[in-house]
Amino acid sequence: MESTQQAEQQRSAQQRRRQLLEAADRVVLRDGPHASMNAIAAEAGITKPILYRHFGDKGGLYRALAKRHTDALLAALRAALDAPAERRRRVEATLDTYLAAIEARPQVYRFLMHPAEDSQLPEQGFDVGRHSAPLLRRLGEELATVIRERVDLGPDSEQLARVWGHGIVGMMHGAGDWWLGERPCSREQLVRSLADLLWGRLAEVDDREGGPGF
Amino acid sequence: MESTQQAEQQRSAQQRRRQLLEAADRVVLRDGPHASMNAIAAEAGITKPILYRHFGDKGGLYRALAKRHTDALLAALRAALDAPAERRRRVEATLDTYLAAIEARPQVYRFLMHPAEDSQLPEQGFDVGRHSAPLLRRLGEELATVIRERVDLGPDSEQLARVWGHGIVGMMHGAGDWWLGERPCSREQLVRSLADLLWGRLAEVDDREGGPGF
DNA sequence: GACTGTTGTTACCGCAAGTAACTGCCGGAG
DNA sequence: CTCCGGCAGTTACTTGCGGTAACAACAGTC
């Protein structure tokens, strides 16, 4: 016991931080986003104040935790997004990568989508329109960049690319969340349906005969 | 008679409940979703236990509060969705109605998007894929119904309509949230850009010459 | 050996959710 | 008139969590 304790003590602060993050990860993935600091500290074999010395407050710990997972997922998505294939294939690969990730580790997904919890000091009123998780914001910007670089949108391409980036990410998120909860179809089918939507099938298909309004 | 007495009591209880909800509304819209039960009770001129007698727990109060606003917004959106106009106009009107609503009352928006708070007993692990606010779920289903009824999608129209419903709602939500936070363009422009996206412009536009991957 | 920084502890504060137990009131029964 | 059951409302409490202050051991340094 003492030897391992001493060995642990001699490690650098960075390594300690990683250790703590891994312990926090285990607890959060087991108990959900409402895991208490006490529980995390206990899992790490220490007590609360040490966590606070390393991460400031709970928001800091959660932000650090979220950053790890976000970076990992973003790297995977970047790979799918940058693959040398035609556009439709890239879009499908990216959708599938995202959906496979949230399907494989739904607890991570649930944690990542928690919008910053508190972290809101009483400023004035409260910050509006910052519901989305940082992951979605980063993803939207990333996709906007890719669109801007790869697609020729004519004038206003800057604005248009950003709108589309966040819109497509939102579509992926919304459909993915619903799908993960109800599992109404296979992943391949979902990917194809969403790609079809983006490919304008909504505009092409006919109205039903006898529908109201016509 | 007992029945009339009970009816009167129920009626007054209903009125009281509405009064309390209105007070809660004021506090939540002033202080944000972290308003304390004490504060709400004080605003209503009473004390905590009465709130608990009426709503069970905080989740119950918040659910009742959210239902009011969700119903109101859904009614407005249904009107836009059912208007007798061509499809593109209906889509734009619906998008604009939603965006105008979140623009006009961002605090309501912020409150509605809070995903059910806790309310999760430790079953096994924790419920996966239920991040989205009830509003978004209901909206997605609503839109799916409209699509299914009005558009001829061939086989698998059931699944396809639901995927598209939730996907489009997610797109609206994601882009709307980002737009509300950064205000990068006018509402009209946002509406048009999103409608363009849905109308397949992404599939139509050309790649940039010299891009990677080709 | 005293001086200082790191790493850890215990014990506490403040605050919010939720509850138990009491009080005052009103309308009907004897 | 009096007594009594039920309902609105209160005070005062428990529990649990985020966050912090103050203290305790141990390392290396002069």
Image (tube, coloured by chain):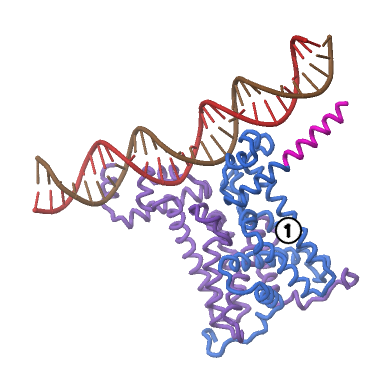
Chain colours: A purple, B blue, C brown, D red
Q: Which residue is mark 1?
A: B73
Amino acid under label 1? Leu
**A156 with respect to D21 (left or right):** right
- Any magenta on residue B206? no
Q: Residue A31 at x, y = what percent?
A: 52, 46
- In front: C13, or A164? C13
Residue B182 image-quadrant placement: bottom right
**B14 with respect to B202 (left or right):** right
Quadrant of the frame with the N terminus of chain B: top right
Residue B49 image-quadrant placement: top right
Residue A208 image-quadrant placement: bottom right
- In front: D6, or A145? D6
- In front: B25, or A129? B25
- In front: A5, or B78? B78
Which stretch did the figure color magenta?
Answer: B1-17
Looking at the image, can residue B85 be seen?
yes
Q: Residue at x 52, y 47 (%)?
A: A34
Q: Residue B109 at x, y = what percent?
A: 64, 58
Q: Secondary structure at mark 1?
A: helix
Q: Main secondary structure of the magenta part?
A: helix
- Eyeballing the image, is B80 above or below A38? below
